[in-house]
Amino acid sequence: MRTEGRHMVVEVSGCNPDVLNDLDRVKEILRESALQANAEILELAFHHFTPQGVSGVVVISESHLSIHTWPEYGYAALDVYTCGEKTDPWRAMEYAAEKFEATTIVKTEIARGQEIEGHPGVYGHSVVETEVMRDGMAVVS
């Protein structure tokens, strides 16, 4: 079935809180994640919260990468949405998780922009897969 995009929703836990709270490092990790995915970067917008936490988005010609961090929990929520076949959103997520020093990754891939059968011009989405990884090993849930 034809789709208009792939959306990766990723929860990373057990991360280094110092990295998650460093605006410049988070921005650089997401910028490099986009490049690792073979995406074309258009713009970056990031914000550091008081007393802690970072949110940001990397706008790419293929769509976007976004992040919200909770250093006090060692946790970050990441999204990568891409259109087309040239980008590899999983590579972006794996790179970011490695740089945040995550011990646990929960990754869900969603196929977006699927025309619903019998309803021309109406689009939906479906979950392709969910995977839990701890210390680099897949965990059966």
Image (tube, helix red, strand yellow):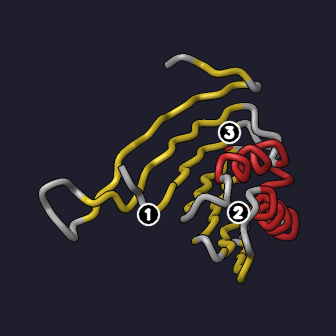
Q: Position of residue 140 (x, y in %)?
A: 54, 17
Residue 131 point in image, percent of width and height: 55, 31
How much space separates mark 3 and mark 2, taking CA atoms?
14 Å
Residue closest to the far top:
140
Please, what secondary structure does the residue beneath circle 2 have? Answer: loop
Q: Mark 1 belongs to which amino acid? A: Glu
Residue nearest the viewer, comparing 140 with 109: 109
Q: Which mark is residue 4?
A: 1
The 10 Å Cα crowd at callout 1, few under 14, some 14 to 19, many 20 or more, is: some
The quarter holding residue 14 reads top right
Q: Of marks 2 and 1, which one's residue comes earlier in the chain?
A: 1
Q: Residue at the location (55% across, 51% down)?
A: 8
Q: Measuring 71% from the left and 82% from the top, which residue is drawn there? A: 42
Question: Residue 30 placed where, x, y %?
Answer: 76, 63
The residue closer to the viewer here, 47 or 44, is: 44
**Disc 2 residue crowd, few under 14, some 14–19, many 20+, Cα 10 Å:** many
- Position of 82 with respect to 102 (left or right) is left
Label drawn at residue 53: 2
The answer for how far apart the CA atoms under marks 3 and 1 are is: 30 Å
Say which of marks 2 and 1 sits in front: 1
Residue at (49% x, 19% y) in the render: 141
Q: Sequence order check: which comes first, mark 3 or mark 2?
A: 3
User: Circle 3 sits on which residue?
Assistant: 13
Instruction: Kindly check if marks 3 and 2 are in contact, taking CB atoms under 8 A apart as contact.
Output: no
Q: At label 2, which amino acid type do we have?
A: Gly
Identified at 34% across, 54% down, the residue is: 125
Determine whether the residue tagged by mark 3 lies in a helix, strand or loop: strand
Name the foreground residue: 84 vs 15.
84
Q: Position of residue 39 (x, y in %)?
A: 72, 67
* Nearest to N terminus: mark 3 or mark 1: 1
Q: Which amino acid lies under the numbered mark 3 shown in the image of this protein? A: Ser
